[in-house]
Image: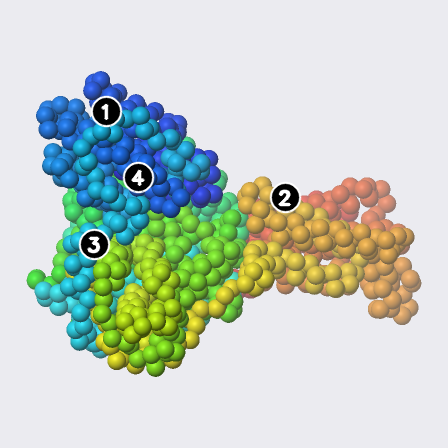
Amino acid sequence: MILFTNEGNPIGLQLLVLAKYLKRPMFLQQITITDAKYKDLILLPTVELDNGLRLFSTAAIYKYLLMHEGYPRNEWLEWGATLLTPALEHYMATGHRADSRAGPVLNALVKKLDDTLSVSPFIAGDKLTSADLFIWSLLAPDGTLKGAQNVEHLHSWYNKIKALPEVQEALKELPINTLSFNALQQGNRYGGLAHVQLRRGISQDADKVLADSGPTVADTVSEEEINTAREAFIYTEPKELTEPRTVLPKPGERNVLITSALPYVNNVPHLGNIIGCVLSADIFARYSRAAGYNTLLICGTDEYGTATENKALAENMTPREICDKYFELHNSIYRWFGIGFDYFGRTTTPEQTEIVQEAFKDVYEAGYILTESVEQLLCQKCDRFLADRFVEGTCPHPGCGYEDARGDQCDKCGKLVNATELVRPRCKVCNTAPVLRSSDQLFLDLPKAEPKLREWVDRAEQGWTHNARVITRAWLREGLKPRCITRDLKWGIPVPHKNFEQKVFYVWFDAPFGYVSITKRYTKDYLQWWQPAPGTDVELFQFMAKDNVPFHSVVWPSVLLAINKGNTLVSHIMATEYLNYEDGKFSKSRGIGVFGNDAQETGIPADVWRFYLASARPEGQDSSFSWTDLAARNNSELLNNLGNFVNRALSFCERNFDSKLPQMDLNHNDFLLLALINRELRGYINSLEKAKMRDGIRHLLSISRHGNGYIQYQQPWALLKGSDDQKSRAGTIIGLSINIVCLLANLLFPFMPTTARAMFAQLNTKQTPLDANKPFATQLLRPGHKIGTPSPLFDKLDHAFIESLKAKFGGSQADKEAVAAAGAAAAQPQSSTVELEAAVKAQGEKVRQLKASTKDKAVWQPEVNKLLELKKQLEAAQKAAPVSTGAVAAAAAAAAAAPVPSASPSAQSVQSLEQAVQAQGDKVRQLKSTTKDKAVWQPEVNKLLDLKKQLEEAKAASGATSASVSPAPKGIDAAAVKALQEKIAQQGEKVRNLKATGDASVWKPEVEILLNLKKELAALDGSAAAAPQTKNKKKK
């Protein structure tokens, strides 16, 4: 079952607790009701059964879950659903949804509960039932029983239920401090439970057990929280944050090693790549350093493999040159985004080769390597074995059928795929069907490593994101299979094993060791991080998108466990879902979406991009980049909330207190504010400790929202006009507000380092450490401290500007290229209608092939645009030359341009056409030698065939003979000769195409057919058969 619920929904917690109590497997999916992906859901929580049926009626869900319990439970379920839930919703609501009449009703219901529990340990009797869990979940949100008196039995029962293992397990997924009855309204398209009438017919004569309290957040603050805030808000000389030249782990301290999935060097990273890996890792590393942990952030480019070879081929460069080019490109993009790696390296280094080859030898000697002969896919057209990611086809797993599954994994079902198992496989480069060939390869014996791996996963997975646990468990559930670790490629690390020296390691065996080799480039003492000494603990946090999880949770750990040298294993896998672009997906190959260099060109500061991407980080589900949302968050959350509070406080101090912090004499309201800020600060720390960036930003913005509300409510500008006490009070308000600004600058630093530095400059102070063990607001700036010069932190993104960016980046780059190409083609005069007809025909065929191979409009629409443009040009050419064809005109022009003295006009025409055929043949051969794209050279082949046809017609009309064709003697069937000549021309073209593949076993039989056809022609017309040609050419 899948439980769809929104954050903080107490009914969601209720169902999750019940499922765990009843031992019913239930997968939690936290969503928002406004997400377009879930537009068919009208109410949260909703439960999706294994058969796909969805239940959104809580009564139906309870009935489905609770089929085997007795009547007392049903009676309490109805009581809780129809009486207690509406009373709590109305009582705990805020603003206009609050109902002051709910207090007495809830008072009576709580009294009934306490009376019931005074005579039995549980609600329905002597045994724990689901009714206890049902009622407890409703009372779980903070503030529900605040101030309740004379309900000792209820309090004792509440604590007993909370301590249950099932409840504690559920609270790990839906923490109690996030629960709120306002979440019910946010989980219902029709306004939460406010439409459920409060039933006030209940007797309200019960003794008063609930304290009088208004429906405000401040009313939920306890006296203990206020006292804690008072005790914490003192000034102590802050420690200056310093970082050693080389960061190494230390015994007895927290040591945090952070890696980001190594970006591949075959293209420019897009926003999804950036937030999925490097930016998330950087934000967490900045927090970790601020918290005082020994922190090392390592990353680099992944440079070996087929993708690099193909990119180099496409750009006419060597693999090393392509790696150098894209390494610098990645590095410059990450620097612009403010990514603060301790070291950004690459995998094409001597250190990488040494470490990978040594690791292989260790694994081999430990007995975890197998040798098997495998069937591999060979693309004859590209003349190379295809790496897994360069084969696409239909997923072979039952029930999936995804047409664009890769040769290593299906993006739709997430299951492992072997390239040879794909249905209707195709080469991703040229789109042709590959053939199978045998080759000996080395395999990692994952089944042998599986027992150790399972034992390790059981211990380690608690620190992983939910999707990482689910993906890993799915692999283990199906049972591990041997995994090939070698490839028949040239660009890679050579395999140091007899008879395998000409092969290289598969990139997913070699790449994870890049983390180690890059650390070695950073420090010669790298083993202190990767093989720490006893007594030194290292926590490894690895950030990645979910498609990289199996290689970090299964494949690489299996290798390290096989080596068994005390290597550091990942303790925290922080995997994101996918970030989409507007209504579609980012695509490197198709150029769809905003890429790293595009972000620089917009003029929007890098910090705003960092903030927005962290806010939209796809943590529990896929999310989407939206230009409109970017503008809204910038204008609302940064400009109007955070920026407004900072500028108000600092400017007020500059204007009215000579830029010096005034004396502060805090009262109850001030400590109440600090208590609320401490709640958010605690939430911020808890979120960042778990690398939950979105929650961290939410808590940070709540602090500035509290600050704005505080200034607005206290109105220091009015107090300045009053008595001395009122002026002093205004000073306290501003002094406290500026200390909150200083706290915000420290909390903002991981997300927006440049903005935080600007805030520190305006405050005239430096960054101070965060104390994760004591998340309380302290006095960071003393009275008398002189601040710097205030200035606005953010600029508004207006509608017209955003619309221009949306138009600029909203479509496919391929679409734009197609339009530009069509425009350029339109600007060039076409020489003939025949050429255009051939081009239209070839383009039409290309469009049909593309539409047959994919349903993705982004792929074939640009080609359709080209086709339509060519048709327009053809129509215009036909109108301009309605009588004679372009081919005849071209032949006449060629004849006029190359007159032959003493030759007749007919002889001139034949000679000109022979020259045209020779020139066009050279052009075709040159094109075929430079590209394998049939769409480029096929139109020229069509021209060649058309010229040959004209030549034959000219010869027949003039009776003339060419040097290569003897006149047909009397009695010879001219039609048969002509038909045979056409067959020879077609067969010759077929042979040339097949020779381009390089496989002699394929094209030699076709050569024999061609020679036999020529012999037939010689026998028919009496000419000498052409001898086989022998050319001494180098194979390309």
If you read the primary sequence from the N terminus, does the residue marked by circle 3 or circle 2 appear first?
Answer: 3
Q: Residue at x 78, y 41 (%)?
A: 976
Q: What residue type is disc 3 on?
A: Ser
From the image, tell me which residue sits under label 4.
91
If you read the primary sequence from the N terminus, does the residue marked by circle 2 or circle 4 appear first?
Answer: 4
Residue 455 in sight here: yes
The crowding category of the residue bearing disc 4, from other C-alpha atoms within 10 Å (few below 14, some 14 to 19, many at least 20), is many
Label 1 element class: helix
Residue 275 in sight here: no
- The tag on residue 571 is 3
Q: Residue at x 31, y 72 (%)?
A: 723
Q: Is residue 303 left or right of residue 392?
A: left
User: What's the CA distance linking mark 3 and mark 1?
Assistant: 43 Å
From the image, tell me which residue sits under label 1.
76
Against 121, is 72 above or below?
Answer: above
Q: What residue type is disc 4 on?
A: Tyr
User: What's the CA distance linking mark 2 and mark 4?
Assistant: 64 Å
* Residue 312 in the image, given as x and y percentages of width and height: 47, 64
- The tag on residue 848 is 2
Q: Nearer the viewer, mark 3 or mark 4?
A: 4
Against 333, is 512 above or below?
Answer: above
Q: Residue at x 23, y 24 (%)?
A: 76
Q: Is residue 404 or residue 45 the one in the foreground? A: 45
Q: Nearer the viewer, mark 1 or mark 4?
A: 4
The crowding category of the residue bearing disc 1, from other C-alpha atoms within 10 Å (few below 14, some 14 to 19, many at least 20), is some
Q: Nearer the viewer, mark 2 or mark 4?
A: 4
If you read the primary sequence from the N terminus, does the residue marked by circle 2 or circle 1 appear first?
Answer: 1
Q: What residue type is disc 1 on?
A: Trp
Q: Is residue 492 or residue 276 the one in the foreground? A: 276
Label 2 element class: helix
Q: Is residue 147 or residue 298 the one in the foreground? A: 147
